[in-house]
Amino acid sequence: MEGRWIEVADRVLVRRHSELDLSVGLVLGDGGCLVVDTRGDARQGAELAAEIRRVTRDPWTVVITHSHFDHSFGTGAFLDCPVWAHEACRTDLVANGPAARDTWARWYRERGQDDIADDLAGTEIALPDRLVTSGAEITAGGRRIVLAHFGPGHSGNDLVVHVPDADVVFAGDLVENGAPPDYEDADPLAWPNALDGLLALPGTSTATTVVPGHGDPVGRGFVLTQRAEIAAVADLCREVASGALDREHAVRLSPYPRETTLVALGRVS
Ligand SMILES: [Zn+2]
């Protein structure tokens, strides 16, 4: 069984996976729990559900941080239960989920990982049924949970999950630790604003723990640094789009590797 639990705050667990360096969340309460993201296919979702059952027998509620397969395609293993997500997450899963499944199954097959490719190809994409437009407050096992959308960023449907009593924020892929931020589906110009929203969540502090979608949990300082880098990329995108800067020059000035920067530039110009 792949993965290990770490407890980042009182009854707030993060399960770290070597596959894609993914981090998913588990918030324990009294008589209920909250699962933040469900991994990338039906088998991975079932494994996660089984691991959660070793921690708690309480009924679960699921929140999906965004529609990308590695965060959402395991949801079927948790049904029947409430599944929260941004409204555009559901729209994206309906419109683009099957194509994303094909693309990523091919990606795994080309890497020789036929087992994951087969699991992914055989996965039915479950849809969220509790949809958020800008924000919502829910409870899980009596604990207050704040769901917030701050406009497009890493995707068009990023949802931040805040656990105020534990001072923990699950950021989805708005924050990435251990690899450059992923711009494939991003709005590079809007991303800094989404991070500003995250950093300004009422109840967060200098000691807030932020759980990225990939990589180990980080502190506020890490997010501020990444916000500055993402804002620098946004400036480069604007300058290239306006013709003030050529692409190669922008690549040299970027805080991120060439490939990451070219993807970001391609999303704007
Ligand atoms: Zn993502």
Image: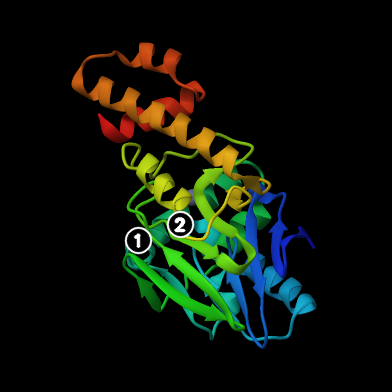
Give me the residue at 32% from left, 30% from top. 266
Give, as a three-letter code, the residue at label 2: Leu
Q: What element carries label 2?
A: loop
Horizontal placement of 113 versus 5: left or right?
left
Q: Is mark 1 on a helix, strand or loop?
A: helix
Give, as a three-letter code, the residue at label 1: Asp
Horizontal placement of 50 versus 88: left or right?
right
Q: Which of marks 1 and 2 is in front?
A: 2
Give coordinates of residue 201: x percent, y percent. Answer: 45, 57
Q: Marks 1 and 2, how far apart in space?
A: 26 Å
Please identify the quadrant where the N terminus is shown. bottom right
Question: Which residue in the protein does label 2 denote?
Answer: 201
Q: Quadrant of residue 236?
A: top left
Give coordinates of residue 168: x percent, y percent. Answer: 60, 59
The disc at residue 106 is: none
Q: How crowded is mark 2: few (under 14 residues within 10 Å), some or many (20 or more)?
A: some
> Would residue 103 be seen by someone viewing this image from the given angle?
no
Q: How crowded is mark 1: few (under 14 residues within 10 Å), some or many (20 or more)?
A: some
Horizontal placement of 70 versus 133: left or right?
right
The disc at residue 92 is: 1
> Which of the marked residues, 1 or 2, is nearer the chain's N terminus?
1
Above or below, 219 against 266 in this view is below
